[in-house]
């Protein structure tokens, strides 16, 4: 397994990591992801990951209302010192006025609750699951600094931030000498490349590593969806499509057609092609994948150990290209002033 630096930190993470959103299945939304609540099954999945060199496990307090953390903690058991655990807070975990957000009041409680559910005394990477525009950024970051200094948290990250959210946060951390976000957990896939427009250049400039969520486009790049075919009965899209990243059908099918061509050339699966493409993108530290069962898990692990050719990457890039929103389409007309990290990658 390849290990990469997580942003501008000393922590090295595997290029593939396991997303434990499939652990639990406490409510209908997460049951559509997966419902691994059997500790023996979860332990087997963790062991397969470790055998492959994947020692990074990601979860969140909101996943199955905390059950994902509980199952993951039990599945890891005595192997705690061999793994890296990431969890997240910000989104609602109750109906009270202080049961949502990234306030000092809430984060201290959320961190303690996650530690108990995970059965550990420290969290390796603690992500803010979304931007809280109500709480002052200084309050959130000073609280995270306290958690780092206490030893409960080792590194901090954010998720689903806009460019200015992340840049302002980094500036405030620098001003006060507080812990800075070294990880941005963001959506990025062959059918969703908006990350490249602003967040990727920011990450390069500021040394922030991306840990990619939903690299298979919210379950659309699993090889089960094809043009002029009905959605498979077991697809989670029946229950979750409205909550995930939007994509126009024609764009989706054009990308899938291109992936199918490359899959035939490489004798790899659609999922493996999509994951391997991401491995070759700038700023990607780790790609978080999920799995309902051992078969899916082993297929996703097969994305590592080989590389798409430059020609194959270029063809996938062309098929998945999207016209950016303003001001990025305008900036692209002046490549000498705003060089694209992607074009540099293709030339290399």
Image: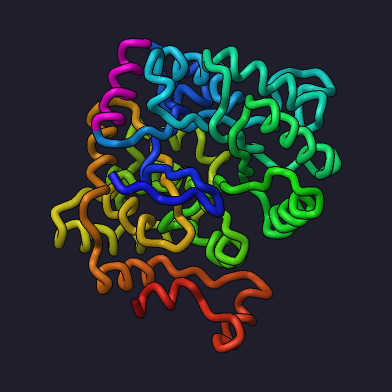
Q: Position of residue 320 (x, y in %)?
A: 41, 65
Q: Position of residue 307 (x, y in %)?
A: 24, 59
Residue 225 belongs to magenta span: no
Front residue of this view, candidates 191 and 188: 188
Q: Main secondary structure of the magenta part?
A: helix
Residue drawn where x is 72% and y is 35% of the image = 144
Image spot of residue 293 (x, y percent): 29, 25
Quadrant including the N terminus:
top left
Q: In the picture provided, is 19 more to the left or to the right than 127?
A: left
State whether residue 128 is above or below residue 160.
above
Q: Residue at x 59, y 34 (%)?
A: 154
In this picture, which residue range is highlighted in magenta? Answer: 39-51
Q: Quick check: 107 left or right of 310?
A: right
Residue located at (57% from left, 58% from top) = 207
- Taking the image as shown, residue 267 lies to the left or right of residue 64, namely left
Residue at 82% of width from left, 24% of height from top?
105
> Residue 342's x, y, as percent?
45, 72
- Does the magenta portion include 41? yes
Which color scheme is applied? rainbow
| Visible residue check, residue 116 | yes
């Amino acid at each position: 397994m390849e290990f990469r630096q997580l942003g501008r930190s000393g922590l090295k993470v595997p290029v593939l990591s396991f997303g434990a959103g499939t652990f639990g299945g406490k409510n209908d939304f997460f049951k559509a992801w997966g419902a691994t609540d059997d500790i023996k099954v979860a332990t087997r999945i963790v062991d397969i990951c470790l055998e492959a060199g994947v020692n990074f496990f990601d979860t969140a307090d909101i996943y199955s209302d905390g059950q994902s953390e509980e199952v993951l903690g039990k599945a890891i058991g005595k192997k705690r010192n061999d793994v890296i655990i990431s969890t997240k807070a910000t989104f609602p975990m109750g109906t009270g006025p202080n049961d949502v957000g990234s306030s000092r009041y809430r984060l201290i409680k959320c961190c303690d609750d996650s530690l108990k559910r995970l059965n550990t005394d420290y969290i390796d990477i603690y992500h803010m699951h979304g931007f809280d525009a109500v709480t002052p950024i200084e309050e959130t970051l000073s609280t995270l600094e306290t958690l780092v200094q206490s030893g409960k948290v080792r590194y901090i990250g954010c998720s689903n931030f806009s460019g200015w959210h992340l840049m302002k946060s980094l500036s405030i951390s620098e001003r006060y000498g507080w812990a800075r976000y070294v990880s941005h957990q963001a959506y990025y896939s062959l059918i969703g490349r908006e990350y490249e427009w602003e967040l990727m250049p920011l990450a390069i400039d500021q040394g922030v590593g991306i840990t990619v969520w939903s690299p298979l486009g919210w379950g659309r790049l699993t090889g089960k969806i094809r043009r002029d075919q009905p959605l498979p009965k077991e697809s989670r899209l029946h229950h979750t499509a409205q909550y995930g990243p939007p994509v126009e059908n024609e764009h989706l099918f054009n990308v899938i057609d291109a992936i199918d061509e490359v899959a035939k050339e490489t004798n790899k699966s659609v999922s493996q092609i999509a994951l391997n493409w991401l491995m070759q993108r700038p700023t990607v530290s780790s790609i978080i994948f999920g799995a309902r069962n051992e078969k899916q898990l082993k297929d996703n692990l097969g994305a590592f150990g080989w590389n798409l050719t430059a020609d194959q990457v270029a063809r996938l890039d062309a098929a998945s290209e999207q016209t950016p929103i303003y001001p990025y389409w305008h900036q692209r007309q002046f490549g000498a002033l705003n060089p694209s990290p992607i074009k540099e990658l293709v030339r290399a």
